[in-house]
């Protein structure tokens, strides 16, 4: 059985969607792997409790306890590699990773980003889409490379921007689609590994 490690920083709703897909009995949409661990860089991340409730091992590697990105990434790598994962999935993970980290997981490091890449890499995507007057927004599942939010695209979903949207209402609409495309993209990847 292939192993997956998921990195989070907050709520972990995408992580929970991936866990549900791995628990599915029916073949359709099933994620054929075991979620070996959920790791957060924030000790207070709500997703840690969600993962524990699902019986999944959790760990915290607090970036604030390290002197610089290289040291943090080295500790994070050590924690991940205990599980010998086939895939490492960023799911609302909020720390930029060093080129060394990305190279170590080349081809097996995946992210979900809340915009229709290549539009709006980086942070505050929903407010930026509203400010530009975008009529469509969405999310992208992509390979992680050293250049932020620039790796090859695996899946995308678009949603309409509606009159009266705030960044929060738009984010919620995008998030419902994230929960569909992330498990699907990972399931497809696993079938071809
Ligand atoms: N690392 C690399 N090398 N490449 C990518 O494509 C990455 C990545 C790390 C995270 C997710 C991401 C996103 O989907 C991601 C993609 C955090 C920041 C950021 O600026 C930007 C993009 C993403 C995640 N983080 C600040 C930092 O200094 C901290 C912000 C905070 O803690 O709230 O690392 O958009
Ligand atoms: C999701 O919308 C995800 O795409 C986004 O944060 C949210 C996390 O929600 N990721 C980023 O903004 C990365 N910079 P979740 O914790 O409930 O999955």
Image (cartoon, rainbow, N blue to C red):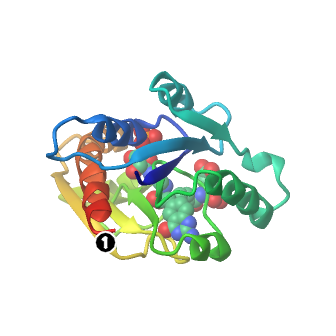
Q: Nearer the viewer, residue 46 or 163?
A: 46
The location of residue 24, given as percent across then percent down, is: 25, 36
Q: Give above or below for 106 relative to 39.
A: below
Residue 125 x/y as whole percent: 40, 57
Measured along the vertical axis of the image, is residue 149 above or below residue 76?
A: below
Q: Position of residue 151 (x, y in %)?
A: 41, 75
Along the line of sight, the residue nearer the viewer: 187 or 72: 187
Where residue 17 sits, quadrant-wise, is top left
- Residue lying at the far front of the rendered structure: 1
**Residue under the image location 17 percent in, 52 percent down:** 159
Nearest to the observer: residue 49 or residue 10: 49
Q: Residue at x 17, y 58 (%)?
A: 135
Crowding around mark 1 (Cα neighbors within 10 Å: few <14, some 14 to 19, many 20+) is some
Residue 123 makes an appearance in the image? no
- In the current view of this chain or complex, which residue is farthest to the right? 67
Picture quadrant of residue 73: bottom right
On the rendering, which quadrant does ligand 1 occupy? bottom right
Q: How many marks?
A: 1
The residue under the point 68% across, 51% down is 79
Q: Is residue 61 left or right of residue 122?
A: right
Q: Confirm whether residue 33 shows in the render.
A: yes
Q: Nearer the viewer, residue 66 or 159?
A: 66
Quarter the C terminus occupies? bottom left
In the drawing, does residue 193 fall left or right of residue 100? Answer: left
Task: Give the residue number, with chain letter if any, for mark 1.
Answer: 153
Query: Residue at horizontal 54%, vertical 41%?
Result: 38
Q: Position of residue 160 (x, y in %)?
A: 15, 51
Q: Is ligand 1 within 8 Å of the beta carbon of the residue shown at mark 1?
A: no
Q: Secondary structure at mark 1?
A: strand
């Amino acid at each position: 059985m292939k192993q997956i490690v998921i990195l989070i920083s907050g709520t972990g709703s995408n992580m929970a969607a991936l866990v549900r897909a791995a628990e599915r009995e029916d073949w359709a949409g099933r994620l054929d792997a075991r979620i070996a661990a959920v790791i957060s860089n924030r000790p207070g991340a709500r997703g840690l409790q969600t993962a524990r409730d699902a019986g999944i091992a959790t760990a915290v590697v607090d970036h604030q306890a390290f002197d610089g990105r290289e040291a943090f990434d080295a500790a994070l790598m050590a924690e991940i590699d205990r599980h010998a994962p086939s895939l490492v999935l960023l799911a609302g993970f909020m720390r930029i990773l060093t080129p060394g980290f990305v190279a170590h997981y080349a081809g097996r490091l995946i992210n979900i980003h809340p915009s229709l890449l290549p539009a709006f890499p980086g942070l505050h995507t929903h407010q930026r889409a509203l400010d530009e007057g975008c009529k469509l927004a969405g999310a992208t599942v992509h390979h992680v490379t050293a250049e932020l939010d620039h790796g090859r695209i695996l899946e995308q979903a678009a949603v309409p921007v509606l009159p009266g949207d705030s960044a929060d209402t738009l984010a919620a609409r995008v998030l419902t689609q994230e929960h569909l495309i992330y498990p699907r993209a990972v399931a497809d990847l696993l079938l071809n590994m």
